[in-house]
Amino acid sequence: MSKIRDIRLVALECALPDGQAYGMARGLTARRGGGIVQVETEDGVTGIGEAWGPTRIAAAYLDIVKPYFLGTSVFGQRAVQQMVFAKHYHFGTQNQMIGLFSGIDVASHDAMGKLLKVPVTDLIGGRQRTHVPVYASGGYFTRDTDQQAALARQLEPLVGRGFPAFKIKIGRNPAEDEARVKLAKQIIGESAVLTVDSNGNYTVDLVLESMRRIAAYGIGWYEEPLAPQDWKGYAELRPRAPVPVATGEALYEAFDLRRLIDGRMADVVQPDLALCGGFSVGRFVAELCAAEHLRLSPHVWGTAVGLAAAVHWVASLPTYPHSENVPFPTLVEYDTGDNPLRDRLLATPLTAVDGRIAVPTGPGLGIELDPAVVAKYTVR
C-alpha cells in the first residue's frame, strides 16, 4: 500500500475589517484562521485536511510526531496515532496534537480516495444522500452598542434562503437571552427551527434560568450550556433541561466523547472533525451515538476543508433509528460570519443552496484549493 512520504502544515490567517469583530459570550475575535495539513504519498498523491487551533502549536507537535508517520501506509495512519498515544501518554489527548492528528486523518482519507478513485463518502460508509442540509450559524455578538439591531442585521439577509434551522449566540445573561431569542423568532418565522449557543459561559443554575425563559419559543437545542469538562453539571442538567442539550465541539479524541455519550449527558452530540480525530474518530462517535440512540450534528467553524469533511461525513450516516420517515435530518453547521478561508479557499466553493450543500463527487474530498488564496493568507 502507498506509504507516506511527507506531512506539511500550512498556517492560514485573515484579519477581519476594523470594527467588525464578532463572537460569543466568552469574547469576540478579529481574526479567522486554520491549519491545512498536506499528506504526500510516495505515489505523488497529496491529500488535504484541516487542523483546528493555533497553527504554531500544531507545527511544533508535527516536528515531534512526523517521523512516526513517514514510511508507513497512508491506510494505517490511525494505528500510528494510537502508538503515539501509548508511547507519549504524558502528552495527553485534550490538546493541539489531536487537532493536528485530525488534519492528518482527514488528509489521509483524501489521499486514499484519490488513490482508489472514489469519494471519501464511499470510504467511510457509502453515500446515503447527494445533498446534506445545513443550518445558518451566526447571530453573533459584536462591538455594536445596540446588540438587538446587530442581531437583526445578521439574520435578515439569511431569511428566504431555505435554511431549515438557525443558530444564534446567547449566554451573557438570561434576560438578554430571552430578548435575543424573541427577536430571532420574529425574524426567521415559525417554520424554521431556532437553536442557541452559550459557549459554556454558564453554571447549572444560570443555564436553567436561561432555558426556562426561552423554552416557550420552541428551541431546537441549547448548545454548550456548560463548560466542556463540567461532567457532573451535564449529568445534573440534562434530566432537568426543558430544551434539548447539545455539546461536544470542544472534546478531543474518542475518550471524552465516549464519556459524554455513555453518560447520555446530551441529546445532540457535536464532534468537530478538525479537532476530535478526523473521520476515524467521527465514525466511532457515530456508532456510539447510534447505539445510544442520540442525535448528531457536526460542529464546523474553520476553513472550507473542515466544511467539506463534515459534508462527506454526514452524507455517509445512516438514518437509524429512523427508516423512510426521518423526523428531523442531521444538520451540518454552516457558519455565516465573514470568513474568506471558508468562502474563497476552494477553486469551487461549497455554497449552501436552498439550505443544502451538494456532496462533492470527485475522488477523495472532491475539492481543490485555490493556490492564490492559499498564498494570500499563508502565515510564515
Image (cartoon, rainbow, N blue to C red):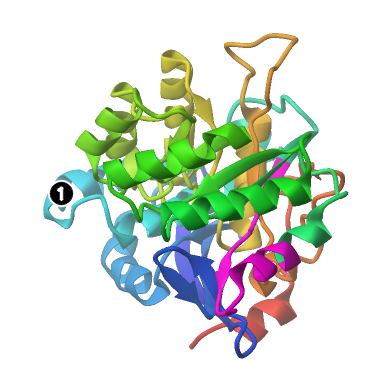
Q: Amino acid at mark 1?
A: Lys
Does residue 19 sit above or below 345 in this rendering? below
Quarter location, residue 49: bottom right
The boundaries of the magenta stretch are 134-153
**Measured from the top left, where is residue 279 in percent x and y?**
50, 40
Task: Identify the residue at image location x=34%, y=47%.
Answer: 252
- Closer to us: 245 or 361: 245
Question: In screen coordinates, is 29 left or right of 135?
Answer: left
- As for residue 151 lying within the magenta part, the answer is yes
Q: Residue at x 52, y 26 (%)?
A: 295
Percent x, y for residue 282?
A: 47, 36
* 296 shown above or below 270: above
SS at mark 1? Answer: helix
Give residue 141's quadrant in the image. Answer: bottom right
Q: Which residue is mark 1?
A: 87
Residue 349 visible to an observer of this rendering: no
